[in-house]
Image (cartoon, rainbow, N blue to C red):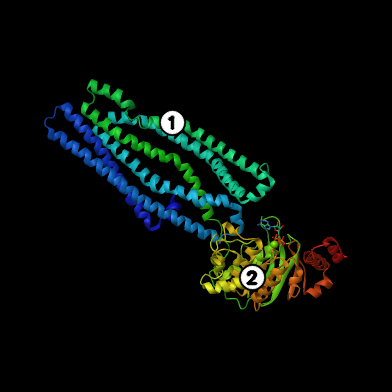
Amino acid sequence: MFNKVLEYTGEYKKYTYRAMFFLVIGLLFNVVQFLAVYKMIDGAIEGADGAAYYLLWLGVFIASGLIYVMFYIHGLVLSHESAYQTLKNLRISLQGKMEKLPLGIIHELGTGSLKKVFIDDIDNMELLLAHALPEGFSNVCVPVVTMIAMFFIDWKLALLSLAALPLGIIAVMAMYKAGTGKMGDFYASAQKMNATIVEYINGMEVVKIFGRDGESYRRFSSDVISYRDFTLAWYKMCWPWMALYGSFLPCVALFTLPIGGYLVYTGASGLSDFLLILCMAFAIGPTIMKAMSFMSVLPQLKYKIETLESILSAAPLKQGSSAFKGKDNGIEFENVTFSYDGTTNVINDVSLDIAPNSVTALVGESGSGKSTLAKLLVHFYDVSSGKIKIGGQDITDMTLESLNDRISFVSQEQFLFNMSLLENIRLGRPEASREEVIAAAQKAQCNEFLQRLESGIDSMAGDSGKMLSGGERQRIALARAILKNAPIIVLDEATAFMDPENEEKMNIAIAELISDKTVIVIAHRLYSIKSADSIIVMKEGRIEAQGTHEELLFKSPKYKALWELSEGTRNWSVTGGNEHINVREELA
Ligand SMILES: Nc1ncnc2c1ncn2[C@@H]1O[C@H](COP(=O)(O)OP(=O)(O)OP(=O)(O)O)[C@@H](O)[C@H]1O
Ligand SMILES: [Mg+2]
């Protein structure tokens, strides 16, 4: 079960083996210490004379103590080096994996659960790699060797000192079994609580408006309570067994002392052997205890590794290994069907031909599937059936990188990283100079609000871009796209948050951005896409009509209605007063 994790140890695996070696040797010297004690007691009983004898064994005692500490520490240093290297490798490959997963799977896992896996669960592997594995191994190895030695000394006394062991092992196994049974529930409730807490914090705005008795707060408290209940239930299950093995295992003298004493009394065993076995038994007691304490965390680790494995082995997006080799920047959708949940189709058998360097607009009611169609083109998800091609090449046939190089996507929801606005824009083209970034920001009409900010373009964007308004975030995203200058541009409601004055300027910037490019625009305000080469009217995931503005006004009642509604709202927002009358007039 731990092989998967060890795979990520890579070249540092030898550190783990070396750690095991040093720990075993260290522990053996710990046993030698007890032997030295035995020698001194035995000397006293046998009447050994001379300080030299005792000094010698005292010296052995101190020296082996020092060696024990040094070797043990060095072993732990090595095992930690290997462990932290593995944690780094695990996190990096998880991140690589995440980039290739369909967004759907990532959403399904949830931010809270993912944070838990990325941070807490992977951190827990330290316990496995730095302690449970090397220390557990040496703490099992050394008692076994010592016990064999005990049998050579006096098998009767050796058996006696092992007599308490089965009781302890039964308790450990019972605990392991009980723990594993409850582990699934316990872990699931931890993950749920994590997800809810993250959601609660992200949705704080809504929570504040609708008060603490809202659904979100109820879920928050119920998840926190259920986590407490599961944790307690789990510990309650394990406590009795922990107490049992905790008292039996270290008690190696439980039978040895009374029965062994009797054997010595009757002459069946020698006093000297009896002392030696007792000393050795005391030496391995704590060692066995330590090995067992690792046993108790194994069920947890096993569960965490399985979760990690399930993410690492989730099916990634279908992508090829070749670069873009399409003949042009035309786009084809061939009978594309898509569903987010695997049951309801959000996109239904859509076939679409977009000529290179043309402007195509997607219009339609909210929820008709416009954004979904755009997201399929940028390969956030794999289609359920059908094909999407660029210049004749299937997008699943090229690498995600070469597809990303082709397309600039300004999505409806803008995300900014908490770094400077300059760096946020530079994401569009990482090698761009400062001047180029500033020029792109200017084209995207960012100057007006950048001037207001104290540090201008070097201001921080705040957590998820919270320092900026919706419209400002959109302009930053547009600047990113301008900087990237990809041959295909997808704009999803790029001017939705704009006031009319800024929108005018934005449209000028967009006009410059999209010249000589293949463009897909999604817009609610139809006048801005009136001059598009082709307008596609979407309805319930299907294409309802397609044509130029004039053609559609004539042949598509749906488009006509959308147009009139949009023109109505435009006048409404421009004229301000008497809006109701105005809208009605437009619709009449
Ligand atoms: N991540 C998602 N998971 C599940 N269903 C989704 C997801 N995103 C969108 N949907 C659903 O898919 C349908 C189409 O959504 P889409 O966002 O494509 O609509 P849209 O035409 O862009 O709407 P709008 O004009 O409001 O932006 C909707 O019914 C929506 O509820
Ligand atoms: Mg949308």
Residue 500, position as x, y percentages in the image: 73, 68
Nearest the eye: 154 or 107: 107
**Residue 329 in the image: above or below residue 300:** below
Residue 126, position as x, y percentages in the image: 42, 48
The amino acid type, in three-letter code, at marker 2 is Gln
The earlier-in-sequence mark between 1 and 2 is 1
**Residue 370 in the image: above or below residue 26:** below
Q: Which residue is mark 2?
A: 445
Q: Is residue 330 visible?
A: no
Residue 279, position as x, y percentages in the image: 26, 32
Q: Name the residue located 62 percent from the left edge and 43 percent from the top edge.
A: 220
Left/right of residue 108 with respect to residue 570 in the rendered view: left
Left/right of residue 172 with respect to residue 32 in the rendered view: right
Mark 1: which secondary structure?
A: helix
Q: Is residue 310 visible?
A: yes
What is the residue that sits farthest to the left in this orientation? 50
Within 10 angstroms of label 2, few (less than 14), some, or many (20 or more) residues? many
Disc ID at residue 86: none
**Residue 266 in the image: above or below residue 537:** above
Could you tell me which quadrant the C terminus lies in?
bottom right
Q: Name the residue located 65 percent from the left edge and 63 percent from the top edge.
A: 383
Q: Name the residue located 66 percent from the left edge and 42 percent from the top edge.
A: 212
Asked if the residue under mark 2 is in contact with the one under mark 1, i.e. CB atoms within 8 Å, the reply is: no
The amino acid type, in three-letter code, at marker 1 is Ala
Left/right of residue 264 with respect to residue 130 in the rendered view: left
**Residue 123 in the image: above or below residue 377:** above
Mark toward the viewer: 1 or 2: 2
Q: Which residue is mark 1?
A: 243
